[in-house]
Image (tube, rainbow, N blue to C red):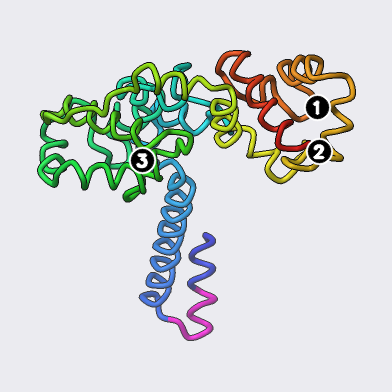
Amino acid sequence: MSFFQARLGMSNENGMAPGQIVKVLVSIVVFLVVAIWLLAKLATSGFNVDAEVMTKEAVAARLKPVGESKASDAPPGMRTGEQVYKGICMSCHATGLAGSPKFGDAGAWGPRIAKGWDMLVNHALHGFNAMPAKGGATDLSDDEVKRAVAYMGNAGGAKFTEPPVGGAAGAAAAADPAVVGKKIYDSVCVACHGAGVAGAPKFGDKAAWAARLKPGMDEVVKIATKGLNAMPPKGGYTGSDAEFRSAIEYMVNNSK
């Protein structure tokens, strides 16, 4: 006598008809199939990733160090639209990431250009949808943002005029070490020195800075340039050593 024959016999003894037994067996099979399908669906659902957010450009943008200065080595306030685009904006606009109009795509830029210069600039300065204010580069001047808008808009079919980069007087003002130092502090150093994070001497804290200035300014600059403890070389700033020194002098002068 087979197993199923034995079960049928037992079931008959318990009052179950053969048709009922078949229904029970079919129900069990259906349940197992559905359970296996659900488990397979659950196991693979994590791999349904939006391809747009996994492009090399998108991943690279997310992995950039905190506080990295990205908009070229030109003096703050003196960067052209192309320099700002290549240093900041292209991380999204080069590929049209997150719904941003792709650089050079007249079809994508046309409706935006039609809304006018003022609207485009307002969105770029204050943020719009997924784009943060100034594209996340808070050290950019308003004119630098406007130049970038004009540069990208013109590549998409507009005829905007970039605000001119300052003449001799403007260049001199932008190159002033105090101005440069403040710009770098506001965009890079403030991340740690603004609140004294990770043991960094807090901006304006005379006692904290006095102890570190004992070896002299040159030694302080040398140590900061190479990096110390949790601070990376130049605090993550990628500009020139002279510009970085301006940032240190700015912090020191405001902490005496």
Amino acid type at image mark 2: Gly
- The residue drawn where x is 66% and y is 19% is 245
Element at badge 3? Answer: loop
Q: Nearer the viewer, mark 1 or mark 3?
A: 1
Give the Cα distance between marks 1 and 2: 9 Å
Q: Nearer the viewer, mark 1 or mark 2?
A: 2
Q: Which residues are magenta?
A: 9-16
Q: Position of residue 182 (x, y in %)?
A: 58, 32
User: Compared to 26, does 110 lie above or below?
Assistant: above
Q: Which residue is mark 1?
A: 229
Viewer-side residue, 41 vs 129:
129
Answer yes or no: do the residues labelled 1 and 2 have beta carbons within 8 Å?
yes
- The residue drawn where x is 34% and y is 19% is 167
User: Compared to 223, does 11 lie above or below?
Assistant: below
Q: Which residue is mark 2?
A: 199
Q: Which residue is mark 3?
A: 50
Q: Report which quarter residue 203 is drawn in.
A: top right
Q: Position of residue 221 (x, y in %)?
A: 74, 18
